[in-house]
């Protein structure tokens, strides 16, 4: 097994381990994070119905126009605040945080802390 496939296998096993433990309900949906080198995405998902209740990403125009770079910690903070604002507009105050196999560090941590500061409880 080369280095790249080992890295992908490690990520997928971490992701599966987190998803076995974390599930969103109608009363407490799941806030999930996906990050790439260029962008960061966040969604609030009700797993019982399979519906996305709120979403924000650095690809969206309303957020992208406010920042210079879209793949750094400042962008993650903006996305955390934006997804929390959209969730609170739909009367969602409590969520379960799904780090999606990523370490709770850097961009993922910045997004989570910004969402907490904006009013989400998790």
Image (cartoon, rainbow, N blue to C red):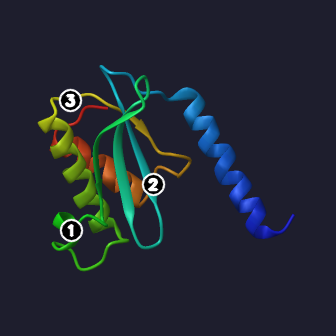
Q: What is the secondary structure assignment of the residue under circle 3?
A: loop
Residue closest to the far bottom = 68
Along the polypeptide, which appears first: circle 1 or circle 3? Answer: 1
Local secondary structure at mark 2:
strand
What is the C-alpha distance between the residues marked 1 and 2? 18 Å
Residue at (43%, 22%) from the top-left corner?
Answer: 48
Which percent across, then down, holds residue 6?
Answer: 77, 60
Residue nearest the observer in this picture, 2 or 65: 65
Residue identifier under label 1: 61
Q: Where is residue 106 in the image (x, y as percent from the top left)?
A: 42, 60
Pick the residue in front: 64 or 77.
64
Residue 13, relative to residue 96: is it above or below?
below
Which quadrant holds the N terminus?
A: bottom right
| C-alpha distance separating marks 3 and 2 | 21 Å
Looking at this rendering, what residue extends furthest in the top direction? 27
Dot 1: element? helix
Q: Position of residue 85 (x, y in %)?
A: 15, 45
User: Residue at label 3?
Assistant: 93
- State the residue at coordinates (69%, 59%): 8
How many C-alpha atoms fall within 10 Å of the one at disc 2: few (<14), some, or many (≥20)?
some
């Amino acid at each position: 097994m080369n280095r790249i496939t080992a890295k992908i296998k490690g990520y997928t096993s971490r992701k599966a381990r987190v998803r076995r433990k974390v599930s969103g309900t109608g009363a407490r949906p799941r806030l999930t994070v996906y990050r790439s080198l260029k962008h960061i995405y966040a969604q609030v998902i009700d797993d019982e119905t399979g519906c996305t209740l709120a979403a924000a990403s650095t690809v969206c125009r309303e957020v992208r126009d406010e920042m210079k770079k879209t793949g750094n910690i400042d962008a993650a903070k903006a996305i955390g605040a934006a997804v929390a604002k959209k969730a609170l507009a739909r009367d969602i105050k409590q969520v379960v945080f799904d780090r999606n196999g990523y370490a709770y560090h850097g961009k993922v941590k910045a997004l989570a802390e910004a969402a907490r500061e904006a009013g989400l409880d998790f």
